[in-house]
Image: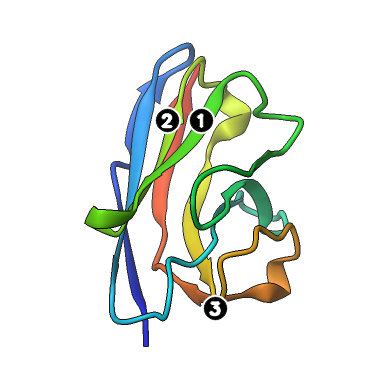
């Protein structure tokens, strides 16, 4: 069983930056692929960024390309989401999620372990 805990959320002004961290505990056969999702009130939960087990393959939603960077530190069992040039439309609850394997996926249904979420609020 894998447990995920997000940290780094908060309130920031438009144009500012935040860095989210996802800390994983529990045993897996190999580092899993991890995704960051977000859900704004009244909206579906969408994939923002994802990273393969080794970090060599990444995915970004069009809405965050060039502003967000996903990275990982496997020895520390951590995945990060650096968010720059934040916009009010980035306001949402952000979740990290892990697959059971290390291959990157954009399908939400393939992510089996989920954190509790952290709120990001970007004020205009």
71 or 17: nearer the viewer: 71
The answer to which quarter of the image holds residue 1 is bottom left
Percent position of residue 115, x then y: 41, 67
The answer to which quarter of the image holds residue 80 is top left
Q: Are marks 2 and 1 in contact (CB under 8 Å)?
A: yes
Residue farthest to the left, as pictured: 76
Q: Residue at x 54, y 61 (%)?
A: 33
Q: CA distance from mark 3 to mark 2?
A: 24 Å
Check disc 3: other Cα within 10 Å, few if <14, some if 14-19, many if 20+: some
**Residue that numbered label 1 is attached to:** 69
16 horizontally vs 104: left or right: left
Q: Residue at x 70, y 67 (%)?
A: 108
Q: Is 114 above or below relative to 54?
A: below
Percent position of residue 5, x then y: 30, 63
Label located before the other in sequence (3 or 2)? 2
Front of the two marks 3 and 2:
3
Q: Residue at x 49, y 67 (%)?
A: 32
**Residue that numbered label 2 is attached to:** 82
**Residue that numbered label 3 is attached to:** 100
97 or 85: nearer the viewer: 97
Q: SS of the residue at dot 2?
A: strand
24 horizontally vs 37: left or right: left
Q: Are marks 3 and 2 in contact (CB under 8 Å)?
A: no
């Amino acid at each position: 069983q894998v447990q995920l805990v997000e940290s780094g959320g908060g309130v920031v002004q438009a144009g500012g930056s935040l860095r989210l961290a996802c800390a994983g505990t529990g045993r897996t056969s190999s580092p899993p692929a991890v995704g960051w999702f977000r859900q704004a009130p009244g909206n579906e939960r969408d994939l923002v960024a994802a990273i393969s087990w080794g970090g060599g393959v990444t995915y970004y939603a069009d809405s965050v390309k060039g502003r967000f960077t996903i990275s990982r530190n496997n020895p520390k069992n951590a995945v990060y989401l650096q968010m720059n040039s934040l916009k009010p439309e980035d306001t949402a609850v952000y979740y990290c999620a892990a697959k059971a394997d290390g291959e990157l996926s954009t399908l939400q249904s393939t992510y089996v372990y989920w954190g509790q979420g952290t709120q990001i609020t970007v004020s205009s």
